[in-house]
Image (cartoon, rainbow, N blue to C red):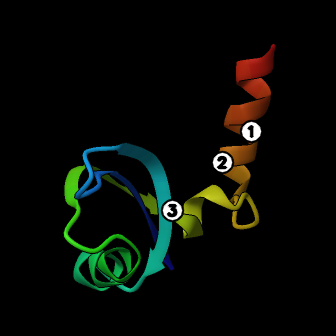
Amino acid sequence: MLKFDFSVKTRDGQKVESVLIHGKDLPDAERKLRQMYHHCEVTQCRTINLDKTDGQSLDIEEVLSLIVKHD
């Protein structure tokens, strides 16, 4: 599952940072964003891959590299 981190400028000119939206792809997430912020301008978008950031799918090499980095 992907998560998208948007920064937007509303139609009133206010800046809103870090609007996190789940989506199957960027167009899906942007559609959901525009349902909340009508006529907004997207100033930045960052993709977050939840499959790697949840920490539950570490393999042994990743665990060992974390141990070595802490020494």
Label 1 vs 3, first from the N-terminus: 3
Quadrant showing the C terminus: top right
Q: Position of residue 29 (x, y in %)?
A: 35, 78
Q: Amino acid at mark 1?
A: Leu
Return the residue at label 2: 61
Whole-angstrom CA distance, mark 2 to mark 3, is: 30 Å
Local SS, label 1: helix
Q: Amino acid at mark 2?
A: Glu
17 or 68: nearer the eye? Answer: 17
Q: Is residue 21 left or right of residue 55?
A: left
Return the residue at label 3: 20
Q: Position of residue 8 (x, y in %)?
A: 30, 52
Categorize mark 2 by other alpha carbons within 10 Å: few (<14), some (14-19), many (20+).
few
Label 2 vs 3, first from the N-terminus: 3
Discs 2, 1 touching: Cβ within 8 Å: yes
Q: Is residue 10 left or right of residue 50?
A: left
Q: Position of residue 44 (x, y in %)?
A: 25, 47
Tell me: residue 43, above or below residue 70: below
Q: Amino acid at mark 3?
A: Leu
Return the residue at label 1: 64
